[in-house]
Amino acid sequence: MFMEKMKDLKVTWNMTRYEVDEVEGIPLTKKMCDRWNETWAFQAKPDDLLIATYAKAGTTWTQEIVDMIQNDGDLEKCKRASTFERHPFIEWVLHEHTPTGFTGVEQAEAMPSPRTLKTHLPVQLVPPSFWEKNCKIIYVARNAKDNLVSYYHFHRMNQIMPEPGTWEEFFEKYLTGKVLWGSWYDHVKGWWEAKDHYRILYLFYEDIKENPRREIQKVLQFLEKDLEKEVLDKIIHYTQFDIMKENPMANYTTLPPEILDHSISPFMRKGIVGDWKNHFTVAQNERFDADYKQKMAGTSLTFRMEL
Ligand code: PPS
């Protein structure tokens, strides 16, 4: 669909890295900021399901789990299109080299209900219609250290994200929230508070990794779906890392290397808990922990950095 359209329009992937601007102090791509009024005015419908995450927290994994649930475990139906075509990314605005008509909002508007949508927005920037329509939202959080490592490698391979700089530089940017979608700390805490007031299922990457059956059952309950054990087994099987990594409709390989260069680092990179230990120096870990303690003081939200 999307890629065919692009071919028809003879889009040349003459990409450059996005410029960054801000909406209410949150760094977003300049393109997103320029079209922010449209995103903010987005009209959610009561039967929309929103999958919300800080970037690299397990969005694609959750999208695949949800799509398999919605399609009663029918893998072929889930392979109808790539992840980003199945679930509009509401705040996303494509590059100026591409023709208009490819904002997440426009993609969502063209999609029949019931829709499943994706966002990385911090809770205060979620378009108000989602709250007004009392939409169900699944939020997934991942521990900050692994999230940081994953985000760093994603910046390296994604040729339209801002330059990550060196590992040391990116580390500092992440701690100060000077990365797209802002501070991880504020993001996870903001959504944690919101879950007490709205229909939000708050999940953790580490929990899904530890026990996918238990966590998928939570999603089933939240979506008020009942599936046979065999179907659940099938969903667990097809959403595990090694299988999803080979699924072109779930591993982002349908995008051209001018956008995502998997030879630098695959989108489906490692999919584990604790990879930060292969990246953090002892000094970085100490600095991170001290800073983390301050930023996460006073919240009941806790994370596991290893299993
Ligand atoms: S994005 O670009 O924000 O939508 O990225 P996102 O999907 O949130 O995060 C990508 C990371 O999730 C890992 N991933 C998985 N882990 C375990 N199991 C499954 N099935 C799975 N699918 C995706 C992916 O490998 C990225 O993490 P890292 O640590 O970089 O491997």
Image: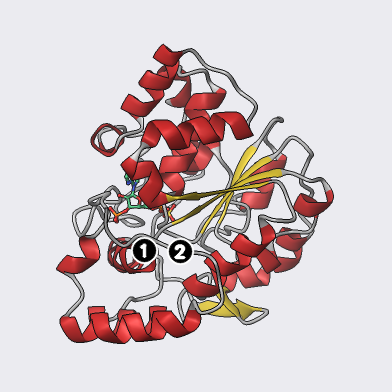
Spot occupied by residue 217 in the image (x, y as percentages of width and height): 50, 30
Q: Residues within 10 Å of mark 2 (few under 14, many from 20)?
A: few
Q: Earlier in the sequence, mark 1 or mark 2?
A: 1
The residue sitting at 29% across, 53% down in the picture is 257
Q: Amino acid at mark 1?
A: Asn
The residue sitting at 24% across, 66% down in the picture is 276
In the rendered view, tell whether residue 121 sits above or below residue 286.
above
Picture quadrant where residue 299 is located: bottom right
Give the residue pinned by disc 2: 302
How many numbered marks does the figure carry? Answer: 2
* Label disc, if present, on residue 137 of the rendered structure: none
Picture quadrant where residue 76 is located: top left
| Along the line of sight, the residue nearer the viewer: 232 or 26 | 232
Spot occupied by residue 158 in the image (x, y as percentages of width and height): 34, 61
* Label disc, if present, on residue 147 of the rendered structure: 1
Spot occupied by residue 177 in the image (x, y as percentages of width and height): 48, 80
| Along the line of sight, the residue nearer the viewer: 175 or 287 | 287
Q: Residues within 10 Å of mark 1 (few under 14, many from 20)?
A: many
